[in-house]
Amino acid sequence: MDKFIFLVLIMPIMLVSLLFAKYVFYAKIFNKLSRPVFLIMVVLLFITHQYFIVSFAMNNVGFVCYQYVLAIAAYYIDKKYGTALMFLSAFTVNVYLAVNSSTNLSRLLIAMIISLGVLLTASIIEKVSTKHILVGFSFTNILINAFIPWLFGNLYPERPYSIIDMCLVIMGSCLIDVLIGLYTRSVEAEQKKLASIERRESHDKLTGLYNYNAYSRFIEKINFDPRGDWLTVMIDLDYFKSVNDTYGHLDGNRALKFFAQGLENFVDQNIGGESSLFRFGGEEFCLLVKDYPAEKCFEKMDKFQELLQAEPFFTKNGQKLRLSFSAGLASTEDSEQDVLLMVRNADAALYIAKRSGKGRTVCPSCHF
């Protein structure tokens, strides 16, 4: 009964607790350290946990078990660290046994070879289960946890390991898998929730484009670290007030969405690179592009103007509208490498375009 409690309940729960504690240490404390200190602390924490696991198992059930759980979990998260921890697991087990006069150099070498086999097994299962990582981890965990104690039982005959023990370890491994699965699902749900909140805060609900808040943060970021040359295109949909007044705000919103989606698709297909499109509010938009020739961008905006004329918007009642826009273009290159000045220059160019007849792009600094 004691073995059942220790192998099926106590050790699995303890291992999962150690696993979660270890990654809390990594995320909250160790990541703030320098790289060499970080690696040293990771190794020390792992050895501490691993030594405790081995000692706990030996003192309560009489044989080593579950010694690869932490390393397998690490492998499925990061192959590089997981690989190192596989061999560190075998080394730590033998350190404990050496302290208790139960091992020798040859057994350490055999344990290292076994670790190589564990690594190979984990690698094969991980590749087969690429689309189902949790399933792969669960299968690896059960297989290794049951097989390795049996193998060590043959290497260390003084540590008996029976078929019943194997069944109990399999049951405990299943509990580990269930607890990790529940934790993983809760983390994924939390991440989706946070991503949804972040998207609502940074995206315009109507058009799906980045909103003014996202624009402000982006401008602040590149103004603080303006690597490369940037272009700004300030865009304003022409005669939009008359669309609202004539056809109503519902069709006005549909027209805005039509224009925004068309512009977004056009930018993705024809400009690409490091570009971001924002809705300022109302019928005004802003395009920011990094390391792109101003003259080429001017030509692309003219091309989009032509596409708008070729593909009209239809209201709910079937009325055909040909939308147009005015735009002003400026770059950091002609704005003293000042991002904020670039935006002001682009805005000034937009007003020139509006006053000079609309349906055009103005770029004072472009050379043709």
Image (cartoon, helix red, strand yellow):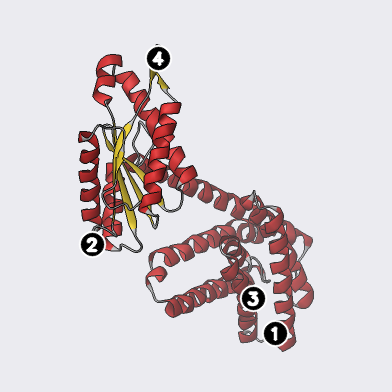
Name the kind of residue labelled 1 in the image: Thr
Residue at which label 1 appears: 103
Residue at which label 4 appears: 316
Q: Position of residue 92 (x, y in %)?
A: 60, 78
N-term mark: 3 or 4: 3
Q: Is residue 349 left or right of residue 14?
A: left
Q: Are marks 2 and 3 in contact (CB under 8 Å)?
A: no
N-term mark: 3 or 1: 3
Q: Secondary structure at mark 3?
A: helix
Residue at which label 3 appears: 87
Q: Quadrant of residue 173?
A: bottom right
Q: Are marks 2 and 1 in contact (CB under 8 Å)?
A: no
Nearer the observer, 322 or 39: 322
The CA span between labels 2 and 3 is 56 Å
The CA span between labels 3 and 4 is 68 Å
N-term mark: 2 or 3: 3
Name the kind of residue labelled 3 in the image: Phe
Q: Is residue 226 visible?
A: yes
In this rendering, which labeled residue sits more in front, label 2 or label 1?
A: 2
N-term mark: 1 or 4: 1
Q: Secondary structure at mark 2?
A: loop
Residue at which label 2 appears: 336
